[in-house]
Amino acid sequence: MCGIIGAVAKSGVNQLLYDGLLLLQHRGQDAAGIVTAEGKTFHMCKGPGMVRDVFHTRDMRSLPGEMGIAHCRYPTAGSAFSSAEAQPFYVNSPFGIVLAHNGNLTNSEALKQEMFRQDLRHINTNSDSEVLLNVLAHELELAAKGHRLDPEMIFSAVASVHRRCRGAYAVVAMIAGYGVLAFRDPFGIRPLVIGRNETAQGPEHVVCSETVALTALGFELVRDCAPGEAIFIDEDGAVHSRQCAQKALLSPCIFEYVYLARPDSVMDGVSVYEARLNMGRQLAQKIRRTMPDLKVDVVIPVPDTSRPGAMEIANGLGVPYREGFIRNRYIGRTFIMPGQTIRKKSVRQKLSVVAMEFKGKDVLIVDDSIVRGTTSREIVQMARDAGASRIYFASAAPPVRYPNVYGIDMPNRQELIATGRTEEEIAREIGADAVIYQDLDALKAAVRAANPRLTQFETSCFDGFYVTGDVTKEYLASVEQQRNPARQDADDAASANQLDLNAA
């Protein structure tokens, strides 16, 4: 997953893009980049690290212009991070195009070969986003046929992108001298919204990953970008849109609502906060139904994502809700820390316990999910060390048993703690007295209750069903083979990163 934002504003976009990236920081902490356009000239600044570390006052002064795009990166595929893979990516032919991408292409290797052999384009990095940029550039060249671009040509090119590309992609791009283009894959796996702000200089528009970036910037949500749709905002601020996919079916990634998105966002008509409250209610019902004799003294969330669900579990069970873990917001991120010992230490640096909430008590700890189990195991041990008598561990999500190939860098099946284990075995692995998982149907119902019009979700990490229809056993095996030891070290710490991603 990554955070993307594009803007067209007569008053200038550099501050809009910077502030927007800060609001989307939870979606990517590995690298950040901004590109603005002044006429047909692009100005770019990007690099590794958090948004606040990449951009300084001198950088912002060097980013003039009335339109631009920006990106914050979370690594999802390929090797360990290279600064060459920071986005946005740029290509100078045929028009001068920059592109930022959230998601993951599942046919990027085949497209690379097509680019080289048929389209005569060179791919310089391991990033599928650079592949996507070159596909778009090639299709724009074919659509224009040497003429000046118009919206119809642009939409024709996006339609061709949909025919060629597979996987998940929410995209913002900028075409020099023309405007900002945004589009979403035919399944709408990754989120994308558009907002508008009326000013004395005329309307301003922003497209971005989550509504939290719109509302905080003073923009009014217009709507979500539909699956398969393209939205083009020209230099004058006029908005053009077109459904460009032959077949489109909204199937948003359900993990966005469980864990990835900020609770104050609304995506595809669903309040993330409301969905998480509903997850807690569903889980409380399951506990009452399947464990009627369970007695706990207190319900404690793992901050921050699981708080709404934990509150509803406590209400549903008639048990006090308490904050037993305190998160240190000033410790650096843990995702790329090497070695098991260092990662365990980092969890304890990020979380400390309020001992009085554990000592001599039977506690129900609630987390958003259990992926590898490293963080869960350490959290349970911290509760034991604080004197808890019995520890029950509840997950707002079902067991994660399959890799995610649509933009979340989940470990391969061998690294997932739920693979080949029963709930009793998982409880023993993490040191808990029992583990309680959400049922998949209950999770879907929790999200759908916030927007009954949603009929389908992308749930592959839970059930192994990949909505794009092109993910085979052979593909999954090839993905696992491409993972080098450096990347596996990063994956090993992915669950610890849950303590970072949803900090508001």
Image: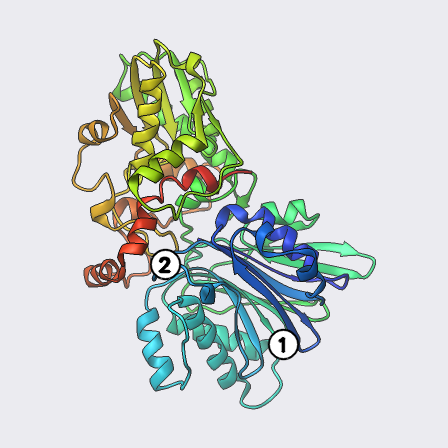
> Callout 1, which amino acid?
Ala
Which comes before the other along the chain, label 1 or label 2?
2
Of tags 1 and 2, which is closer to the observer? 2
Where is residue 468? Give x, y as percent: 33, 60
In the image, is residue 122 above or below residue 489? below
Residue at the spot 71% in from the left edge and 47% down from the top edge: 218
The quadrant in which the C terminus is found is top right
- Residue 474 picture location, percent across and down: 19, 63
Pointer 2 local density, CA inside 10 Å: few below 14, some 14–19, many at least 20: some
Which residue in the structure is indicated by mark 2? 80
Image height check: is 480 above or below 148? above
Q: Secondary structure at mark 2?
A: loop
Whole-percent x, y for residue 426 in the image: 22, 32
Q: Nearer the viewer, residue 498 or 492?
A: 492
Kindly indicate the quadrant of the structure image that contains residue 16.
bottom right
| Label number found at residue 292 | none
Whether residue 448 can be seen here = no
Residue at image location 36% in from the left, 16% down from the top: 386
In three-dimensional space, the C-alpha distance between marks 1 and 2, rounded to whole angstroms, equals 31 Å
Q: Residue furthest top?
A: 360
The answer to whether residue 340 is seen in the rendering is yes
177 and 203: which is toward the camera: 177
* Residue matched to label 1: 176
Residue at the farthest bottom position: 146
Provide the secondary structure element on which disc 1 rests: loop
The kind of residue on which mark 2 rests is Ala
Residue situated in front as seen by the camera: 107 or 415: 415
For label 1, the crowd category at 10 Å Cα-Cα, with few meaning under 14, some 14 to 19 and many 20 or more, is many
